Image (cartoon, grey):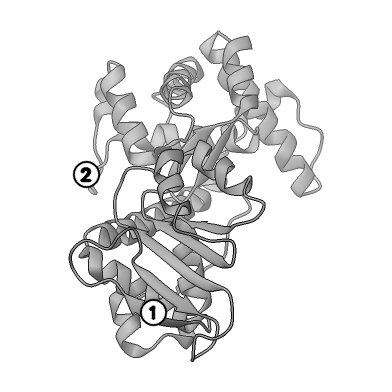
Amino acid sequence: MADVTRARTGELLRKLFEILKAEPEGLPAAEALERLAGSVTLSEYEAGVYDSGSRRLEQIVRFATVDCVKAGWLIKHKGTWAVTDQGIKAYNELTQPEAFYKEAVRLYHVWKKRQVATPNVTAEASEALPDEPEKAPSITFELAEERAWAEIESFVTAMDPYEVQDMVADLLKAMGYYPTWTSPPGKDGGLDIIAHPDPLGTRPPRIKVQVKRQQQRISREGLSAFLALVNEEDAGVFFCTGGFTKDAEDFARSQERRKIRLLDLERFVELWIEHYSKLENQARERLPLTPIYFLTPKD
């Protein structure tokens, strides 16, 4: 990427950080990159596209963000990018774009030096090292994880709400619980599934489940309405594909007498994978997953 200077890369990174700073929960990488493209004037080189149809801008930024991740400024998780407190501090202190990116590069090489025995690397020398080939596996891994997770999210959020409800019941059964009731279509009074730890339903706790297939996060108020249905001898499980606000999560953790477990889509999929071998064939067809293993890059 010889057509892009370090100063220009720094400008793009700082604009990216500006966008992400306004989103404490982070943004899907594709959305963050799209917002970035719409916030800057792209050069002919940056606006160029590859055979895949993606802009060259995306590659420039993705390679540069590897430095930011190793610097501790940026977190990438299942396709979502979020700026850390360290990243905000660096953004505020290193206001010159080139200095901002140079520091990220320097910290990348500090990290790299810890991984393998290499000679001392000065800030000046690190600027000249050809890092792109070393970072390529990391970008490939990142894109594979992003695309896989995006497909899972899209698949589940497009499912019929009652099929999602049945899928949650399937998971409970695979985990060793006994769903005895699932809500039929229509008003459910706030409960979608009732399950027990034994086949006859004679042992506590009774497990009360609410299932929401929606993109919006559940607020504290939404969680309070569910908690009103969960007695001290019950256990409550709230699954929402869109997740929960921080206030809702804090409220759930503060419960001392009532047992409550919040499940977002990520945690649900983790449990689905963990208990996949115990799922019935019909259940697997609801959310069919195939593991593909390859070497995880160090970068």
Give amino acid for label 1: Asp
Residue 26 numbered tag? none
Camera-nearest residue between 7 and 283: 283
Q: Is residue 271 left or right of residue 146?
A: right
In the rendered image, residue 286, in percent from the top left (x then y), is placed at: 29, 76
Q: Compared to 160, does 283 lie above or below?
A: below
Please state the total of marks drawn on the protein image.
Answer: 2
Residue 165, percent from left and from top: 31, 69
Up/down of 144 relative to 110, above or below:
below
In the picture, measured across the screen, residue 163 lies left or right of residue 134, that is left
- Report the side of 287 relative to 63 (left or right): left
Residue shown at 52%/36% (left/top)? 247
User: Where does the image place residue 107, in percent across and percent down from the top left?
Assistant: 69, 30
Distance of label 2 from label 1 (alpha carbons): 39 Å
Compare marks 2 and 1 and give the one earlier in the sequence.
2
Mark sitting on residue 53: 2
* Residue at the image point whose x is 39% and y is 79% from the top: 170
Label 2: which secondary element: loop
Q: Is residue 165 visible?
A: yes
* Image vertical order of residue 270 relative to residue 28, above or below: below
| Nearer mark to the viewer, of 2 and 1 | 1
Determine contact: label 2, label 1, CB under 8 Å.
Answer: no
Quarter of the image where one finds residue 289: bottom left
Q: Between residues 37 and 163, which one lies in front from this camera angle?
A: 163
Helix, strand or loop at mark 1 = helix
Taking the image as shown, residue 288 lies to the left or right of residue 171, namely: left
Q: Position of residue 44 (x, y in %)?
A: 24, 22
Q: Residues within 10 Å of mark 2 (few under 14, many from 20)?
A: few
Q: Is residue 219 visible?
A: no
Residue, disc 1: 170
When asked about the image quadrant of residue 203, the answer is bottom right
**Which kind of residue does numbered mark 2 sit on?**
Gly
